[in-house]
Image (cartoon, rainbow, N blue to C red):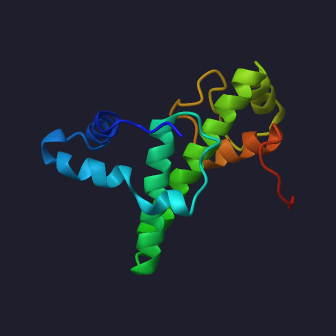
Amino acid sequence: MPRAFPSQITAYLAATFKKPENLDHATVPLLMSAPWRAFHDLSFITDTVLQEMIGLDLSAVATDLQSGERKGATIIAGSCCEALLLYGLQTREAKKRGAIAGAVGAITWPSKPPKASDLTDRSWDLFSYTEVAHKVGLISGSEG
């Protein structure tokens, strides 16, 4: 399985936390050998950097739950859900152009619908990703 390079992980962390001077670059190799691989099969994600980041976040959720940090675990788990749904929707759109716009148009939104042409626009949230993913058949669940 291809692996993300430590420089890619460092760049991602620097961009995310906006304080690259606070990063301990010696810890990046440790992150690369994270135990998440033993418990979470993310091989369906072709972007290795994204795969690493979601895997690390899933490990953080487990750690937070073990230490009783329920709020942190909930927030990070929601972020993982959003990332996985976004990846799935982007993949679906790449395979079937117009699927997302069709789904957004077919849903009755309680307020302004998300911007169908840009899945990373700020108009999207976990609710929007979930509704559209359900509509295009990425996820299923009981109604009502």
Quadrant position of the C terminus in the picture = bottom right
- Near-viewer residue (45 or 102): 45
Q: Is residue 10 above or below residue 90?
A: below
Q: Judge from the rendering whether residue 58 lies leftward or rightward of residue 143; answer left or right.
A: left
- Residue at the spot 58% in from the left edge and 58% down from the top edge: 40
Q: Furthest-front residue in view?
A: 1
Residue 52: x and y in percent read 45, 46
Q: Judge from the rendering whether residue 11 lies leftward or rightward of residue 103; answer left or right.
A: left
Quadrant position of the N terminus in the picture = top right
Residue 113 seen: no
Q: Furthest-left residue in view?
A: 21
Residue 130: x and y in percent read 70, 47
Q: Furthest-right residue in view?
A: 143
Residue 87 seen: yes
- Residue at the spot 68% in from the left edge and 34% down from the top edge: 89
- Residue at the spot 53% in from the left edge and 52% down from the top edge: 80
Residue 98: x and y in percent read 77, 20
Q: Judge from the rendering whether residue 8 lies leftward or rightward of residue 35; answer left or right.
A: left
Q: Is residue 52 above or below residue 94?
A: below
Dividing the picture into quarters, in which one does residue 57 lie? bottom left
Tell how many labels.
0
Q: Is residue 32 above or below residue 49?
A: below
Q: Is residue 117 above or below residue 82?
A: above
Residue 120: x and y in percent read 53, 31
